[in-house]
Image (cartoon, grey):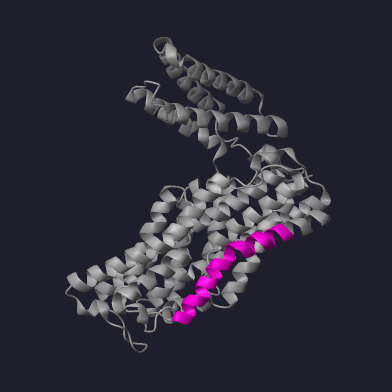
Amino acid sequence: MVSSPFLGQIDLSGYLLVVFVICILAVIGFEFVNGFHDTANAVATVIYTKALKPGYAIPWSGTWNFLGVFLGGVTVAMGILKLVPLDALMTLPVSVGACLVLAVLFSSIVWNLGTWYLGIPCSSSHTMIGSMIGAGLAFTFYYNGPGVNWGKAGEIGSSLILSPIIGFGAAALLMLFLKHVTKSHALFHIPKGENDRPPIHIRLLLITTCTLVSFFHGSNDGQKGVGLFMLILIAFLPARFAVNHAVAADKVSAALNQTEQVVNLRTGSQAENKPVLAELLAAVKQTKIALAAKNETDVAKTYHYRKQVEGLVKDIRALVKDNRVKLSTGDQATLSAAAGELEKVTDFAPVWVIAIISLSLGLGTMVGWKRIVVTIGEKIGNEHLNYAQGASSEIVAAATIGLSTGFGLPVSTTHVLSSGIAGAMVASGGKGNLNNKTLKNIALAWVLTLPVAIILAFLLFMLFHLFI
């Protein structure tokens, strides 16, 4: 048994402890690679428009990525966790969770490094989600259980497909707007030579858009690393990390009591809805029992408590949306607040996890950025980026990623920004303004990412299953 100030007592056998450490290092490595693979998109425009030199742009972007992860919450991270059979993993040997985690991480890292080496902008989000689907399918193959949450996968897949389409269209429209409305000819200047820098007002605009893309990239992509880190902790140490033991029992009890009071009040006046309300009251009672029994060392009790809280939150939100049940505005607010408080029990990440991922992403931003930056800045179009094209694509990327984070949906910074630049190039000079060879390579990587990641993760799960 090993003791850690963050993890508490780690009761893992020798080889599982080694695997656990490898998993932690792998998720840090994944986020580090994500930093120089994806964040290069954020700095490409500011570097190639000469608004900032690389020596300033890279640390600046890295810092805002760090802040984005740290301040972005955990909604996207929890969405990632819901892709895999988390409940089933808690009831199976730790080695099964280790196989799934390692398969996801190693397949993601391999594909990300390969596309980075070739200088192809490719989505870390697509890679990771494909890997999770592949590992989940392998889990189903071995254990005959639901290995992939297809509903959540469809929701995430839709956001990943729609976001580059939105990026292309919105950037093209914004570029056309600037062309026909603005009177600033300097905005459409193509910098030539090392000392051809934009005027101060355009420079500030480009630095601001770079900052926003970096921050929102951290708040969205960084959360994926947080989700993977939590998957490792829950797979290896479920009793400690499957629920947030830091949420005080009296706060949970208060939320349960508030729910009970509202439902009891409505039960007396709405006889026709009594079965639905009685079912919710029974769920509240069972959750109170599970709360009293849970502790940080008993996996079965922790698992039961998590399931009760998850089910109750789902039931409360369903009741608020149920038009058959007449609830006042105050009742709806009370129930929604109670559900939000209860959700903190299952949807959380310790501050130290967020800090590690933030640091990994921020440091990764400062390494290996140049390959992707060259493709974004020089090879998507047949001409050098002008200031308006850089600003349009980054404004659209920042807005799209920020909104997606708010809705708890992962999107690809790479896809949104690359398609945004393509849209801005088309708006400037038509289809002939695009570099077809580069676009074909990017499109091929985009098409191959999902199936390759699925197959690679599936095979790696099978390989690890032989040895762990």
The image shows residue 209 at horizontal and vertical percentages of 35, 66
Q: Residue at x 38, y 23 (%)?
A: 331
Q: Quadrant of the N terminus?
A: top right
Q: How many marks?
A: 0
Q: Is residue 214 visible?
A: yes
Q: Percent position (x, y) of residue 254?
A: 49, 23
Q: Is residue 275 magenta?
A: no
- Visible residue check, residue 77: no
Tell me the chief SS of the magenta region. helix
Farthest-out residue, bottom? 193
Q: Quadrant of residue 286?
A: top right
Image point (71%, 34%), residue name:
299
Residue 306 image offset from top left, x and y in percent: 61, 33
**Residue 105 percent location from the top left of the image:** 65, 59
**Is 446 in the magenta?**
yes
Q: Which residues are magenta?
A: 436-459
Task: Report the side of 5 relative to 198 (left or right).
Answer: right
- Judge by depth and name the residue closer to the eye, 257 or 99: 99
Q: Residue at x 49, y 46 (%)?
A: 75
Q: Residue at x 43, y 58 (%)?
A: 162
Direction from residue 183 to residue 409 in the image, left or right: right
